[in-house]
Image (spheres, grey):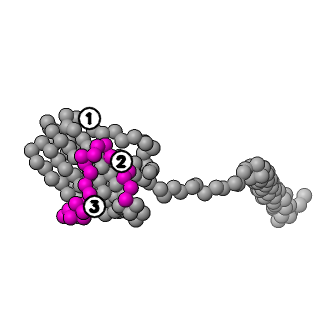
Amino acid sequence: MLPKEEKIKKASDLEQPGLFDKENEKERIAKKRKVVYIAMILTIGLSLSFWIYRSIRNFNFSFKLPELNFTVSKPKSSKINLPQDSASWSVFLKRVDSNSIIYQTSDDVFFDDQQLDNIDYIDSSVYSSSLPEGLKIKELVEEKDNNIVYVSKIISPNQELILIIKIDDSKDLSQSKNLLPGLIGQLYWYSLQK
């Protein structure tokens, strides 16, 4: 039989290798997990990179800038619709630079150039709310009984217009005044088409 010290030494030698085996086993499992994680990440990463490559290759990169339209849209009407109310409407529209008449409903609205030059216009835009901004507008409005005479000089960078509108025998003068801006806008856009 072995002495007591040797028994303890032999017993500790037997215990030691088992302890290292358990620690080695844990390290081996941890290494296997790391390898599995790395393999999964590489597999997913490669699959994702191939999918992105295929998507990019099939994707059409043609890029076209949108066309910007800086023109003001104008109504495409070649006919002037005079307001339909109880009054009698007469219109005269003339281009000053070429002295050409753009629109005229009757001869009784006509003013000669000397009369138009002697009018004391007011820098105002009471009835021209339907016109685009940036125009210089001078107006003269005369009201008498149930009649209105509206004279306007509309100045834009490319043309100067004289507009005369006579409203005679209106039963409801306030309604006729409310219809005036719509007609002025309609006549202005009509002048750009001519």
Image coordinates for residue 87, horizontal then vertical, percent:
20, 37
Most distant residue in the right direction: 1
> Can residue 69 be seen in this snapshot?
yes
Image coordinates for residue 94, horizontal then vertical, percent:
34, 54
Say which residue label 1 marks: 84
Q: Is mark 3 on a helix, strand or loop?
A: helix
Image coordinates for residue 162, horizontal then vertical, percent:
30, 57
Front residue of this view, candidates 67 and 122: 122
Who's the residue at 64% across and 55% down the image?
64
Figure quadrant of residue 131: bottom left
The reply, left or right, for residue 74 in relation to residue 44 is left
Say which residue label 3 marks: 113
Most distant residue in the left direction: 145
Disc 2 crowd, CA 10 A, few/some/many (<14, 14-19, 20+): some
Q: What span is colored magenta in the figure?
A: 99-122
Q: What element carries label 1?
A: loop
Disc 1 crowd, CA 10 A, few/some/many (<14, 14-19, 20+): few
Who's the residue at 74% across and 52% down the image?
56
Whole-number angstrom distance, CA of label 1 to CA of label 3 = 30 Å
For marks 1 and 3, the one nearer the N-term is 1
Q: What element carries label 2?
A: strand
Say which residue label 2 marks: 103
Question: What is the count of numbered marks?
Answer: 3
